[in-house]
Structures are given as C-alpha cells and as structure tokens.
Image (spheres, coloured by chain):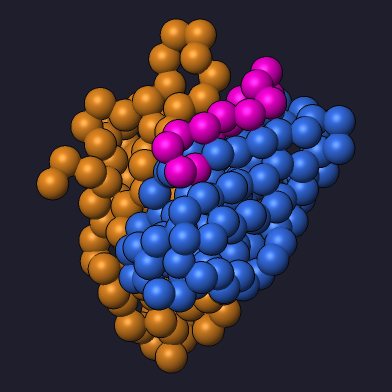
Amino acid sequence: GENVEQHPSTLSVQEGDSAVIKCTYSDSASNYFPWYKQELGKRPQLIIDIRSNVGEKKDQRIAVTLNKTAKHFSLHITETQPEDSAVYFCAASSRENYGQNFVFGPGTRLSVLP
Amino acid sequence: DTGVSQDPRHKITKRGQNVTFRCDPISEHNRLYWYRQTLGQGPEFLTYFQNEAQLEKSRLLSDRFSAERPKGSFSTLEIQRTEQGDSAMYLCASSLVSGGRAYNEQFFGPGTRLTVL
C-alpha cells in the first residue's frame, strides 16, 4: 500500500520568509496530491492540490511542485504571515487504491515568528 | 453552517463500553469517509461509502468497529468494547464524485474526540 513521508516535522520561520515542506510517496500509481492545513483544534482544510499530469501549481503565496519520477512533491509558502502557523499535511491518493481515500503524511508544524 | 457536521464533539467513556458517532455530510455529497487521527499524526483512513454502499475498509478497522450509511445521507460509526487504544479524534469527510472526474476535494468535519478511560 501507499506510504507517505513528510519532512520536516517542525519548521520555524521569520515572518516574511519562505517555508518549504517536502513529501515523498511510495506508490507509483498515486496521481492526486492534496495539501491540508489544520489549525489548532480545527478541522483540516484543503489549501492546494495537484494532479499527476501537472508539474507545478500556484495560488497566490502558495505553490506545489510534483516530481513523479522521484515520487516527491513539495509545498512552498512565500511571504509567510503569522496566520500561516498551523500543521500542514500532505496526502496521496490513487484511483486504483483505497477507493480514492487519502493516505496522509504525519504533518509539519509550521510556526511563523513575528 | 452547511459544512460537514459531527456529533458529539467530545465523548468520554470507560473501557469496555460501546460508543456511536454520527456524521452529517454536505447534503449533495455522495461520498463519505471516516478517518482516525491521533496526536501528532495525520488522519488515517478507516472506511468510505459511496451513497449507502460501504466500498472499502482499512485493515485498521477491527471487527469492533462498524459503520453504516443506511440512506446514503448521514453515517454512524460504532465502536464496541472500547479499548484505551481507541482514544483518538474521529474525523468524517465528504466529497462529490460525478461523471468522469476522478478526484474531488474532501471536506472534513470538526471531528469527535474520544477518550477511553
């Protein structure tokens, strides 16, 4: 089955700096990769996703890149703000496995210091 | 609020008791998922439904766990003979899958936090 690893587990940056979170996956059949943000005590919320036919996707300060050959994808947050502080989860999903449920990484706790 | 709702939000029970959680998905969503999340970890898939049919169950789902979605709307997750290891946040999510589109965003509920004493 799919296995998703995520690094780093914690990340602290100064406000205005960039943050990068990396994930690797094991199942070459995975072809959909969402990123969720979970603030303390709140539900996970989708912030960006990428499909396997695309190498990069950007939405304002957030971007995701995908390298299918190496089986890794990354989340990039530029001009970080204190409200970006949260736990970020990457996930991978395959139409062939698990009926499109997601396999999540263990999460990265991002702290943006003012 | 028209998002995914879950009830109760918190449940404290003694080991050996049965508990039941409810999830109400976004009304037009045909897929409903259950996940379990422990502290410091990402959500782990338990099971999912398409309409009323339960199509997949994780190996994590022991025979003490059962889920239903009798009318293709709300779903219940029951845990029988609870154990301390069942303590976790139980998250429900829903999505709309239609036509040729393979993937749709899963919208999560606020979760039910279970504590087994």
| Residue nearer the viewer, B117 or B36 | B36
Q: Residue at x 71, y 62 (%)?
A: A7
Is residue B35 visible in the rendered image? The answer is no
Is residue B13 visible in the rendered image? The answer is yes
Q: Residue at x 25, y 36 (%)?
A: B26
- Pinpoint residue B110: horizontal percent, then vertical percent: 31, 59
Picture layout, residue B30 above or below residue A24: above
Q: Residue at x 86, y 31 (%)?
A: A69
User: Which chain did the renderer colour blue?
Assistant: A
- Pinpoint residue B108: horizontal percent, then vertical percent: 37, 48
Q: Residue at x 25, y 26 (%)?
A: B28
Q: Quadrant of residue A21?
A: bottom right
Quadrant of the image containing the N terminus of chain A: top right
Outermost residue toward the top in this view: B99
- Pinpoint residue B41: horizontal percent, then vertical percent: 59, 67
| Residue nearer the viewer, B68 or B95 | B95
On screen, residue A107 versus residue B37, left or right, reads right
Segment tinted magenta in the rendering:
A49-62
Outermost residue toward the front in this view: A16
Q: Is residue A59 magenta?
A: yes
On screen, residue B76 versus residue A112, left or right, reads left
